[in-house]
Image: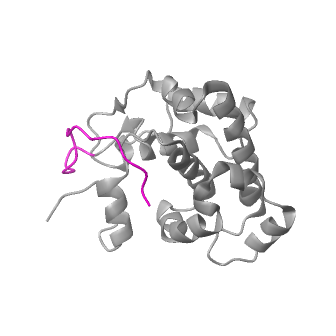
Amino acid sequence: MKKRCFWANPKNPLYLDYHDFEWGRPVHDDQHLFEMLILEGVQAGLSWETVLNKRAHYREMFDDFDPEKVAAYSEAKLRRFLKDPGLIRNKLKIEAAVNNAKMFLKVQQEFKTFDKYLWSFVGNKPLRVEGITSVKDCPTETPISRALSKDLKKRGFKFVGSTIMYAFMQAVGMTNDHTVDCFLYGKKIRSLKRVR
């Protein structure tokens, strides 16, 4: 049996797939980066597994995380979202998704792609945290996640605190934090094509 990072719930196939084929793999597709930015913000105060279990429904309701479409959502649509049990029914998080879509488009205009802006924070190559064996070894934020958080907040993004941004950095492969006993530890991990 494959040994994985301690957080990957072996009883949830979605979680195992997420760990094995997505988490920690460098992402350069803007639409996927937008999806993860929104989902990591939605996770605030919840488990990632809760969000992951609702991800397919989020994709359906949020137009596959097309930032232009999300930025144009009406108040009426947001009110419908608040009644949808397949979503995290938190008004601030739902409103933040629309706000962040608008800010995301502004960053794209300024830098040509969100990817170009984002990856500049790590010198355009993934960081690696060595020696993680348990939850106590895992950083929850770093100077880079704090800098990214600060800059995003300055640009008007919501739900982008430094801890959320570190989880986002892990999710999109800006940092590779697989534990030393994980079968993916130390392996060269290829960039991820957008997960559908």
Quadrant position of residue 95: bottom right
Vertically, is 80 above or below 165? below
Horizontal relation, residue 191 to residue 1: left or right:
right
Where residue 20 sits: x, y (%)?
29, 56
Q: Which residues are magenta?
A: 179-196
Q: Position of residue 6 (x, y in %)?
A: 30, 57
Q: Position of residue 155 (x, y in %)?
A: 73, 31
Specify how the rendered protein is coloured: one colour
Q: Position of residue 39 (x, y in %)?
A: 57, 55
Which residue does the image show at 44% across and 21% down from the upper left?
123
x 64%, y 62%: residue: 62
The foreground one among 42 and 146 is: 42
Q: Is residue 72 visible?
A: yes
Q: Residue furthest left?
A: 1
Position of 175 with respect to 169 (left or right) is left
- Number of dots carrying numbers: 0
Q: Decide which of 148, 133 is in the foreground and name it.
A: 148
Image quadrant occupied by the C terminus: bottom left
**Please, what is the dominant secondary structure of the magenta stretch?**
loop
Above or below, comparing residue 48 to residue 125 in the picture: below
Q: Residue at x 35, y 44 (%)?
A: 25
Is residue 97 visible in the rendered image? The answer is no
Q: Quadrant of residue 151?
A: top right
Say if the magenta span includes residue 14: no
User: Residue pushed farthest right?
Assistant: 75
Q: Is residue 182 left or right of residue 76?
A: left
Q: Is residue 180 magenta?
A: yes
- Image quarter where the N terminus lies is bottom left
Instruction: Spot the residue most to the top.
Output: 123
Residue 104 image-quadrant placement: top right
